[in-house]
Image: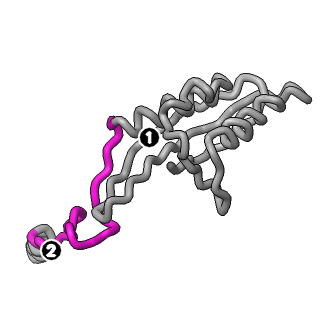
Amino acid sequence: MKKIFLFFFVSVLFISCDTTTKNQTDKDDPMSGYMVGNDEKSDAMVKFTKAYQDNNLESVKTMFTEDAIFHVNDADVTFDEVNQAFSAGHEFFDDIKHSEYHVSTMYYNDGAIFTNYWYTWTATSKKNKRGSNAERILLV
């Protein structure tokens, strides 16, 4: 029994002494970088999604330059087109809400910046008055 305990202890000691770790902030790797959750871009995402929930995207138009282009799947659209498309959902649903949301901004070594917004979308159908929900992710 002592030999088994000694073998187990020595094995754990060798495993815990392994110092090879992958540096998550390797400056030479363009896909490395860092992530934060309370920066200006993350706060802007929360403000933008709140305006969407309130069906008032016009109130956040000044967050973007006049020539801002939004990349939605394979289409490039303007703020006005985004406003129109997002607002269309309010024609079919009442009480659109985002709950359980998490937001963070990723700053990559190659200069790319992406803000991620994970959330649960809920609303009530205007047609049948039933609730609906879905887990979603929004990347900007």
Name the residue carrying label 1: 103
Q: Secondary structure at mark 1?
A: strand
- Residue type at mark 1: give it: Val
Viewer-proximal residue, 23 or 90? 90
Q: Which residues are magenta?
A: 17-39
State the image coordinates of residue 6 (x, y, percent, origin top left). Answer: 8, 73
Circle 1 Cα neighbour tier, 10 Å, few/some/many (<14 / 14–19 / ≥20): many
Q: Residue at x 11, y 71 (%)?
A: 19
Choose top left, top right, bottom left or bottom right for residue 3: bottom left
Q: Residue at x 24, y 63 (%)?
A: 24
Q: Residue at x 53, y 34 (%)?
A: 100
* Position above or below: 3 against 116: below
Q: Residue at x 62, y 27 (%)?
A: 58
User: Does residue 24 appear left or right of residue 120 in this picture?
Assistant: left
Name the residue carrying label 2: 20
- Residue type at mark 2: give it: Thr
